[in-house]
Amino acid sequence: MIAGGCRCGAVRYTVARDTLPAAYACHCTDCQTWSGSAFSTQFFMAVEVLAVNGTVTEYGFVNPIGRFSVQRFCPTCHTRLYNTNDARPWLVNIRAGTLDDSARIDVPLHIWTRSKQPWMILPATAECYPEAAPIAALERLAMLTSF
């Protein structure tokens, strides 16, 4: 079982999976603003394997490519935990930094690289997309594991 949660501990989650998933880094300007950093790191899982304990606050908006996204936060410490998107309603997108064991996550894919910070050097082996990745690439990523 994979576990994680918010900074204050009011919201905890588990993912019914034994191995860490592979993650991706998003370099879009929205993620830069949301994270207060150069990118955000997250991973996809099937919606049905996520179990959340605690109350989350929801914020919905239309993303840069016109999809409706619903972000979930801890109402106490405001940690952004996960989101869903109408382009792929069967997947949940979990923030990798909220994992209890986030140091072991692998990040083989980078999206929205056209807006990445110029000083950010991506690995030569990374799968990169100037904008959003095809859904097939994201689903494939959800099946990969980190070591």
Image: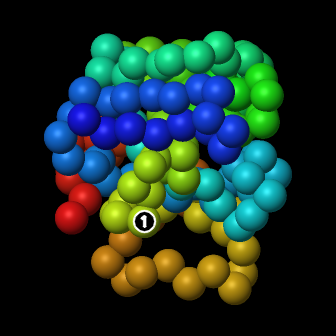
- Tell me: residue 88, above or below residue 32: above
Instruction: Tell me which residue sits at (71%, 67%) in the image.
Output: 38
Percent position of residue 10, x then y:
64, 27
Residue type at numbered disc 1: Ala
In the foreground, 66 or 43:
43
Percent position of residue 19, x then y:
20, 47
Q: Is residue 48 left or right of residue 58?
A: left
- Tell me: residue 103, above or below residue 73: below
- Tell me: residue 111, above or below residue 55: below
Q: How is the image coloured?
A: rainbow
Instruction: Tell me which residue sits at (29%, 48%) in the image.
Output: 21
Q: Quadrant of the N terminus?
A: top left
Q: Is residue 129 visible?
A: no
Q: Is residue 97 left or right of residue 17?
A: right
Judging by the rendered image, the residue that carries numbered circle 1 is 103
Q: Is residue 131 visible?
A: yes
Residue furthest toward the front?
9
Could you say which quadrant of the image residue 7 lies in? top right
In the foreground, 140 or 50:
50
Residue density around tag 1, few if under 14, some if 14–19, many if 20 or more, within 10 Å: few
- Tell me: residue 36, above or below residue 132: below
Indicate the secondary structure of the residue bearing disc 1.
helix
In the foreground, 77 or 145:
77
Image label count = 1
Q: Quadrant of the C terminus?
A: bottom left
Percent position of residue 69, x then y:
64, 23
Instruction: Tell me which residue sits at (37%, 60%) in the image.
Output: 105
Percent position of residue 26, x then y:
58, 54
